[in-house]
Image (tube, helix red, strand yellow):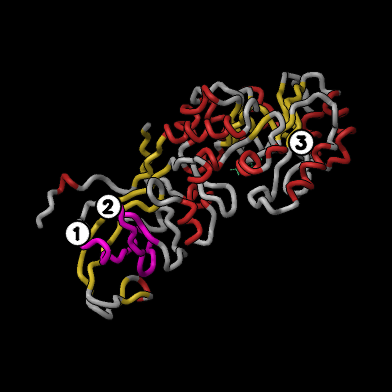
Amino acid sequence: MPISITEVDGGACACIDLAALRHNLGVVHERAPGRRVMAVIKSQAYGHGMLPVAQALQERVDAFALARIDEAVSLRKAGIDVPLVVLEGPLTADDLGLARRYALTLVIHDLHQLALLQGDMSSGALDCWIKFDTGMHRLGFDPAQAGWLLGQFRALPWLRLAGLMTHLANADDIADATTETQLSRMRLVLPGCGLARSIANSAGILAWPDSHADWVRPGLMLYGASPLIGRDADALDLRSVMTLSVPLLAVHRVSCGEPVGYGGTWRAPEDLSLGVVGIGYGDGYPRHIRRVAKVLLRGHRLPVVGRVSMDMLTVDLRGLPEARVGDRVTLWGDGLPVDEVARWADTIPYTLFCGVTARVTRDYGG
Ligand SMILES: *Cc1c(COP(=O)(O)O)cnc(C)c1O
């Protein structure tokens, strides 16, 4: 059958459904009613595009969290005017200047940062969270120093304390006792001091109501993937935000016994139709995906066969002989949960989202 060129639309596309994003924020509000929400949009909103995501959510959240100062500065410059919390805080005195200039809120988690603040001569107002390490041993002060620290912070009259924060290490596993340990350690940090508290990431919001405190910090769940081991996004009422798709580049016949792709790691078990899909690890599709991996085409799940290369991968079309060049193939998203693809790749949805490279067009709808 001849194919008209106009039928074939575009290349690799990550379609971002902003209505699904807002729905997922609604799930946060439902699960943690009355709590303030610091939506985590670091690392380009987990690959979804930081600015469009911020614009879609800004009226419905109390703050955004970023990892780095430059992420927050770029959002501010783009006109986002809700509080922006920098989770890694300042590293240099220049960072303090940027934080004041762009009215950023800094998370202070280390004595080096305290010293920066104490050595600061400008005395302009600055908003800060204090972060404690309750067991993850990544960032945060030792809770044993809490009383002394609070005195140090309160001695800086221009510093405005936004609250106390900690981060959960194992909240994704509802059977893991670490979370209870972390929660009880956090309870002992400055009880009755009157400052707001923030503990819960997405997994905390969904599985650990005792972690909700005053502010919740959802990341992954906003994007519609499940943050809990063994629980589907569907069952949590989360909707997929990113659908990664690309047109079929070529369809051809391969004879029984012929190898396909680099290294010839797969051979056709019989004469069959092979589809070549225009996406590869250069776009962020994982090269190390296991043999059980599938893509979605016209509602059918088709197996990925042979090695994933930089710009292409190949699929066995025996389940859908009518497939044509130009048909859009879904790698994950609507109809093919990213959680499932992550399992096939022995990873987590976070890395798949963050790994979608710049050459993939982001297309916003909803
Ligand atoms: C990334 C991050 C979050 C969000 O975590 P999710 O698991 O994506 O919900 C919350 N808090 C901190 C400190 C983070 O670094």
| Mark sitting earlier along the chain (1/2) | 2
The quadrant in which the N terminus is found is bottom left
**CA gap, disc 1 to disc 3?**
62 Å
Residue at (49% x, 56% y) in the render: 342
Type of amino acid under label 3: Gln
Q: Quarter of the image holding residue 104?
A: top right
Type of amino acid under label 2: Arg
Can the viewer see residue 364? yes
Q: Quarter of the image holding residue 107?
A: top right
The residue stretch that appears in magenta: 294-321
The quadrant in which the C terminus is found is top left
Q: What mark, if any, has residue 322 been given in the picture?
A: 1
Q: Nearer the viewer, residue 311 or 327?
A: 327
Classify residue 194 as left or right of residue 312. Answer: right
Q: Is residue 225 above or below residue 81?
A: below
Label 1, residues with CA under 10 Å away: few <14, some 14-19, many ≥20: few
Classify residue 335 as left or right of residue 319. Answer: right
State if disc 2 and disc 3 touch (CB < 8 Å): no
Q: Nearer the viewer, residue 244 or 232?
A: 232
Q: Is residue 106 above or below residue 357?
A: above
State if disc 2 and disc 1 touch (CB < 8 Å): yes
Mark 3: C-beta under 8 Å from nearest atom of ligand 1: no
**CA gap, disc 3 to disc 2?**
54 Å
Q: Quadrant of ligand 1?
A: top right
Q: What mark, if any, has residue 333 been given in the picture?
A: none
Residue 91 lies in the magenta-colored region = no
**CA gap, disc 1 to disc 2?**
10 Å
Q: Which residue has dot 3 on it?
A: 113
Q: Which residue has dot 2 on it?
A: 298
